[in-house]
């Protein structure tokens, strides 16, 4: 055990951690030259194209230092705020962390929030300044920021470059010298922490774990503590570039278990594995059920594809247990699913994967967040869909989720960012200067306000310099109303939204104007109305296509013309009663993308 080192890499999105991991694998000859490619650990095409890590990856490296062989277990974590729970479990499985900061960008929000988690878990932090080969690197300034943040000495910061391989040897030596070996009782009952799982179509779910106490052997009967399910360990082993089977995985090691599990719901990240015969006395602390924070309806464009969409969703869920879905139907869009996502990036990735891996064309409705509605009888209803909000008559209060947002930016953009956050119903908590020209601002804000377009606006007003991170802080009472869109008095369920009273009038007006442009003219007038309950707050009318029925009257008495116009009016009225308004697909998409 003394020669094992478990460490993870934490960094903000796009600070070069996957590239640096490539150099570590190359230097320790874990990956042969023919297998070497950029971002070895990012297995999805999507991850490579966008240059982001979506799923944690683990790999074992062998390193010879001063004539001794060491086993280095590296866990590469995602850098985006949506996946912060996965990062927290990966951190819990390690004794050390490489804190990577981009020398051209400095410290950013996600770096700080992941660093706090690492410090809470008593990890040894090794600060690394990456991208030193860039012309725009500012090593002195960024080193000052790191020293302010973690209180280390300047000599402890390693200058490195994932592209050129600068500083890689120094990093490996620091890992061996500074990161402590795992502590645990080899003789104690088995206690292993699951930090990730993947789906293999031949072998079922493969769970990755780190053994805290005890050991696990092939053929053992094991139990997953939080789900209470029991399995036989068909195969256990360690993680190289592929899976390497072993008869026994011992204390402190990182490995995998295959036991023919078919459903991703049975393997939860953060769960504890123990033996059935002599179980451990308690589960490893820190386990949480991952809760979706953004909900949206996903519908196939062609209604015949509903069953194919269901099959695609089930396959996706095997690879990504944090995706939840349940069937729902809508008058306008037909049959589909109400899906729960971790955040907007997660939602975008799922849409992209449905398109690429399963060739599914889907429409996604307006994303919304979960609300809690309290009725006058004292019942609590969780509202994920505007249509499930109880009637105004029985509704007592509605609570919405709030977040603590942390924004780090250059001081030039403070005014604009403050205006944006206050406009989104934010409350300033604190403002703290990290250096003379970098400032950290914290706001309490409703989650619903950042779901829509907050991130894009933040990036554009700060010219890309602001970084953003958040964590949820619970629910607060709020004045929410259900905004309905009516066409000729008929409500269109796919367009109804839950919104704050202050935003309702503007949103209703904009939706009506947008629909007026996009709904084609009919043979009769179409009234487009936005309403809260029975009160109409905005109206637009799409004028009828009219035939000039008086064209054949050359002169003559006015009563002849009036008779023809009256006759036409009656026809239009009858048509309006039986005719229904077709809302074109592009009108839905345009309203859903309202900026």
Image (cartoon, rainbow, N blue to C red):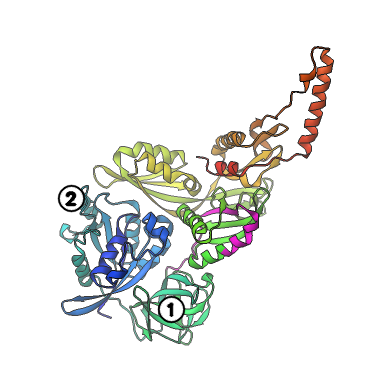
Q: Residue 204 placed where, x, y %?
A: 50, 75
Look at the image and tell me in which quarter the N terminus lies: bottom left
Q: Which residues are magenta?
A: 286-311
Q: Residue 140 placed where, x, y %?
A: 18, 50
Mark 1: few/some/many CA within 10 Å (<14, 14-19, 20+)? many
**Residue 133 in sight from this viewpoint:** yes
Q: Is residue 474 left or right of residue 524?
A: left
Q: Is residue 226 left or right of residue 461?
A: right
Q: Tell me the mark number nearer the camera, choosing from 1 and 2.
A: 1
Q: Circle 1 — which element?
A: strand
Say if mark 1 contacts mark 2, CB within 8 Å.
no
Q: Residue 242 placed where, x, y %?
A: 37, 74
> Which sits in the foreground, 139 or 187?
139
Mark 2: few/some/many CA within 10 Å (<14, 14-19, 20+)? few
Residue at 50 percent of width and 66 percent of height? 321
Verify whether residue 306 appears in magenta: yes
The residue that mark 2 highlights is 140
> Which sits in the foreground, 5 or 197?
197
Q: Is residue 367 left or right of residue 564?
A: left
Residue at 61 percent of width and 35 percent of height? 512
N-term mark: 1 or 2: 2
Q: Circle 2 — which element?
A: helix
Q: CA distance from mark 1 to mark 2?
A: 46 Å
Verify whether residue 369 appears in magenta: no
The residue that mark 1 highlights is 257
Whether residue 379 is situated above or below residue 591 in the rendered picture: below
> Which sits in the foreground, 509 or 307?
307
Whether residue 534 is situated above or below residue 83 in the rendered picture: above
Residue at 52 percent of width and 43 percent of height? 593
**Residue 95 in sight from this viewpoint:** no
């Amino acid at each position: 055990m003394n020669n094992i080192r478990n460490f993870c890499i934490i960094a903000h999105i796009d600070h070069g951690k996957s590239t640096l991991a490539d150099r570590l694998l190359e230097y320790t000859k874990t990956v042969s030259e023919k297998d070497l490619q950029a971002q070895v650990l990012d297995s999805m095409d999507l991850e490579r194209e966008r240059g982001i890590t979506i799923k944690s990856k683990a790999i074992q490296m062998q390193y010879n230092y001063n004539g001794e062989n060491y086993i280095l277990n590296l866990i590469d974590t995602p850098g985006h705020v949506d996946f912060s729970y996965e990062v927290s479990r990966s951190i819990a499985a390690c004794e050390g962390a490489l804190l990577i900061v981009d020398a051209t960008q400095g410290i950013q929000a996600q770096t700080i929030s992941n660093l706090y988690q690492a410090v809470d878990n008593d990890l040894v932090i090794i600060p690394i300044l990456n991208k030193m080969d860039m012309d725009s690197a500012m090593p002195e300034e960024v080193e000052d920021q790191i020293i302010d943040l973690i209180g280390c000495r300047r000599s402890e910061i390693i200058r490195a470059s994932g592209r050129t391989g600068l500083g890689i040897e120094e990093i490996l030596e620091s890992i061996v010298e500074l990161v402590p070996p795992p502590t645990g009782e080899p003789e104690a009952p088995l206690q292993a922490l699951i930090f990730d799982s993947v789906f293999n179509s031949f072998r079922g779910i493969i769970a990755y774990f780190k053994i805290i106490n005890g050991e696990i052997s092939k053929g053992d009967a094991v139990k997953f503590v939080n789900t209470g399910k029991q399995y036989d360990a068909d195969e256990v082993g360690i993680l190289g570039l592929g899976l390497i089977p072993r008869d026994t995985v011992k204390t402190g090691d990182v490995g995998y278990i295959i036991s023919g599990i078919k459903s991703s719901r049975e393997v939860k990240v953060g769960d504890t594995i123990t033996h059935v015969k002599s179980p451990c006395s308690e589960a490893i602390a820190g386990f949480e059920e991952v809760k979706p924070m953004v909900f949206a309806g996903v519908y196939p464009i062609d209604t015949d594809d509903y069953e194919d969409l269901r099959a695609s969703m089930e396959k996706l869920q095997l690879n990504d247990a944090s995706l939840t879905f349940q069937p729902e139907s809508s008058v306008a869009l037909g049959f589909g699913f109400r899906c729960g996502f971790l955040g907007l990036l997660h939602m975008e990735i799922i849409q992209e994967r449905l398109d690429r891996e399963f060739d599914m064309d889907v429409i996604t409705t307006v994303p919304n967040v979960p609300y809690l509605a309290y009725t006058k009888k004292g019942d609590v209803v969780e509202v994920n869909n505007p249509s499930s909000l109880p009637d105004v008559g029985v509704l007592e209060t509605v609570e919405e989720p709030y977040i603590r947002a942390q924004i780090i930016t250059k001081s030039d953009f403070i005014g604009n960012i403050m205006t944006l956050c206050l406009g989104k119903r934010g409350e300033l908590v604190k403002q703290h200067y990290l250096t003379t020209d970098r400032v950290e601002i914290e706001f309490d804000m409703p989650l619903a306000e950042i779901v829509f377009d907050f991130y894009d606006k933040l990036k554009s007003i700060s010219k890309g310099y602001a970084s953003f991170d958040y964590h949820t802080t619970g629910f607060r009472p709020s004045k929410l109303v259900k905004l309905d869109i009516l066409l000729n008095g008929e409500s269109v369920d796919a367009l109804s939204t839950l919104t704050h009273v202050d935003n309702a009038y503007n949103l209703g007006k904009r939706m009506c104007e947008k629909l007026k442009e996009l709904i084609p003219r009919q043979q009769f007038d179409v009234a487009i109305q936005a309403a809260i309950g029975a009160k109409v707050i905005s109206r637009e009318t799409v004028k009828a296509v009219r035939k000039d029925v008086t064209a054949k009257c050359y002169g003559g008495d006015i009563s002849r013309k009036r008779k023809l116009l009256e006759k036409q009016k009656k026809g239009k009225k009858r048509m309006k009663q039986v005719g229904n308004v077709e809302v074109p697909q592009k009108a839905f998409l345009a309203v859903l993308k309202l900026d």
